[in-house]
Every structure is written in C-alpha cells, then in structure tokens.
Image: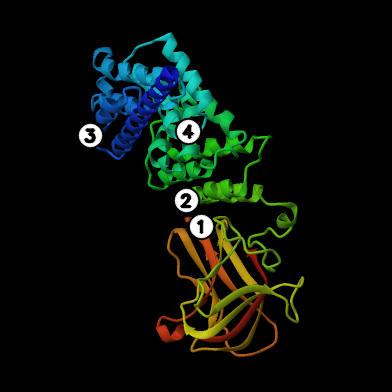
Amino acid sequence: MVLTWLGRLLLIAFVACAAVVIIALQVSDYFTEQAKQGHATAQRSALDWYPRNSVARRIDGRRRLPANLTTLSPETARPAVDAFKQAVANSPLETRAMARLVSTQALAGVDDPKVNQLATLSDRLAPVKSQVQRQLLVAALARQENAKAVSHLARTLVGDPGSQSDLFPILQALWLSDTGRSAIIDLAQDPRPYRWWLAFLRYVSQLAREDIRVPDPGTGDALNTLRELIATRGSSVAWPLQAEEREVYIGALRREGLIDEAYLHWVNGLDKDALLRLGYLFDGGFNLPFDNSPGFGWQAKIAPRTGVIISRSETFGSSDDASLRVSFSGKRVRFRHVYQELALPPGGFRVRGRVRPDQLEGRIGVGLVFRCTLGTTITPAQSEPWLGTGEWREFWFDVSVPPDCKGQQLRLESLGNREVDHELRGTLWLDDLQIERFE
C-alpha cells in the first residue's frame, strides 16, 4: 500500500516537472519568435526560460557582434563566439550557428581548426540553405578563398534569389581574380542548376549599358567581361550556349554600337534552315516564325486590344506558302510594330518586294520606311503608301547608306503625322522582300 502511494507521488511529481519543462519550452519558443521579428531583448527572455535554446543563443550571439564587422578583432568577437559555440553545443544540428561561428572567426582573423571543421559540416548539412551559405561566403571572402566563395555564393543565390542585387557585384568581382574566374568557368560549363545565371548575364549587360567600367586588368570593362562569359559558355560541351544567353549578348553589343560583332554572333547562332534565308534582309518571305529577339530577324509584336493583328498566313499568290498579314480594325493606333534591324555596309541598296492591299482604308496608308539608327542621321527613305484593294504587285525604292551609318532599320508603319492618319481598316499583305546592292 505504501509503495502504491509512493508510486503515485512520483508519477505526480514527474508529470508536474514535465509540465513545468513544457511550459518553459513554449514560453522560450514564444520569446524566440519575438526575437526573430526584431524585438531587441526577447532572446534573453527566451534564454531565461530555457538556457539551452540554441536558436535564441544564436540570435543572442549575432546581436553581440559590433555594428562595424570590418574592424572585428578576437577580443570584440569573443562574446558572440562564445554564444555561437554554446548554441552548437546545445544543438549539434544548429547549422546557422555553425556558419555564424565560422564567419565571425574568419572576420576576426582567427584560424581555429575545430571551427574550420564546422564549416565543412554545416556546408554538407545545409548545401542550399541561404543563411548558412551566405555566412560561409563571408568567411571565404575574408580568407580570400575565392574558389570557395564562388561555390557558396552560387548556392546562396539558389536558396535566396532575392539576394541577386547584393551578390552579383561580388560575383563580378570574383571573376576578376584568377581563382574566382576558374571557379566561375567550371560553373558555367553547365549552369542549369543555377537559375540565376541568365539574370547574372543581364546584370553584367546592364553595367555595359550604363557605361559602368569595372577595373579589370585582363579585360578592361563590363562589356568585355560579358564577352568572356559568353565565350566560356560557348565552349561548353555539357550544356551549349542557349538562345537566351545569345540574346543578352547581342543586345549588349547593339547598345554599344558594335553592330558588326552583334550581327556575326547572331549569324553563328542560326540553324541550317535559317542560314538559307540569310541576306542583307533576313527571311524576306516570312517563312520562319517571327524572331522577336535583339538580333536581326523580324520583330512583330503588338499589345492586345489595339485592333491590329499581325500574323504569317497563306493567301493566293503567297510564295512558299507564307506571307506577312497585317489586319486593321479602324482604331487610331500608330502602327510601327513590324520591323527588322539591319547591318548594311556603306553603299547604295534597293529594297524590293511584293504587296497586296485588301480593302485597306485610311487617309494616307501604310508603307515601308528605311532609317539609320546608329551614327549619322539621314532622311528616311520609304515606299509609296499602300491603300485600296488590288492584286499582288511589285514595288521598290532605293536607299543610300553613308559610311558612318553603322546600324539601320526597315519598318512597316502607318504614314502621316496626325492622329487621324493612323486610323486604318482592312488588310495588307507583304511577301518576297529583299535588299539588293547596286553601285
């Protein structure tokens, strides 16, 4: 009987103790969440309730770091280091505390073999956890381990795409070092695991657009950095250079006025069928889908609800079963949405083709206009305006390209300077466009 009552008392004591522990854990977790949301002293309350709370201990360590980490010394880092070590001791799987400990020691200039082992362990346990990889990146940069820095930066971006604005400048700077460049070249052999890669190329392209010259003894500027990155991708066997990457590069070259280089790079990316349609004007028969890229193919895009429809269709008299078809519904829309960028050398040229208006009504009409887009300004040359209804007929007009006209454009557009001039209804067909050179 005595044993029975003793057992009951022990059970009650055990339950009471367990309840106290559970309450302490719950209250500690509550204050930990408050600390995560920015409450300045909440982590200390969490530790008062449960001293072995590893997350609260890590937050406490982080807040013990001085504001200026560039002047961190072993003495000023010690309170934070002790807190991070205690967090790891309380929970051996607290990878964020491990990574914080590694970065803090690295910034303080302390080389601790045991802490270095934690770097390897946290990297293996959290290979794409952005908070962990970012701290390992900080440590690698502090120790000038550029190859490791590239690896950690790449995986930080995988886990946290929103950090691109912070980390892309670092990645660009790493490209300028031999070890960093070698690591990026290895990564670029197959960037498919890194969805941010194309965004990084666009970032470098943006630097070139804004004429932000990055100090680079090997290349000189952001455009050359982009040029080398594209060359690296072009040499890949594992994953060939993709069309989107080509477009970024071609767009950058065009913006820099390097039309010839942009054209050659664009041509090198064409398939055999497209190469058959190459000339001074590309695919004048409209037999291929609209390119709509920064290259030298046809651009044909217009916003919905404008009353204009652009398509490639077949009609009687079409060559190779395709012609350009533009239909207008009568809305006042300044139409100039079908065009092609050109890379003509200096000299005289004739633009020719076939046209068929079909019940096309308006004040002036639609025509092809040739302009210089880079270099000297020349008076635009244009075809006659097209209106009415008729059979297929041939047309032509001549243009002269001066030596300093480095880039040109041929555009189909509604003619006229007043709003009412752009009120069109009906259909226009074009086919067999070509540009011929003559002396």
Determine contact: label 2, label 1, CB under 8 Å.
yes
Label 4 – label 2 distance at C-alpha:
42 Å
Task: Tell which tag, 4 or 2, sits nearer the viewer.
Answer: 4
Dot label at residue 257 = 2
Return the disc, 3 or 2, that comes first in the chain's sequence.
3
Which quarter shows the C terminus? Answer: bottom right
Location of residue 193 in the rendering, given as x and y in whole percent from the top left corner: 58, 38
- Compare marks 1 and 3 and give the one earlier in the sequence: 3
What residue is drawn where x is 25% and y is 33%?
Answer: 42
Residue 40's disc number: 3
Q: Nearer the viewer, mark 4 or mark 3?
A: 3
For badge 2, the amino acid type reads: Gly
Question: Where is residue 342 drawn, in percent x and y?
Answer: 56, 59
Label 4, label 3: how many angstroms apart (C-alpha)? 25 Å
Q: Is residue 173 visible?
A: no
Image quadrant in which you'd find residue 99:
top left
Q: In front: 178, or 60?
A: 60
Report x, y in % for residue 227.
Answer: 52, 39
Q: Which residue is mark 4?
A: 129
Query: SS at mark 1?
Result: strand
Q: Is residue 5 above or below residue 346?
A: above
Q: Nearer the viewer, residue 246 or 354?
A: 246
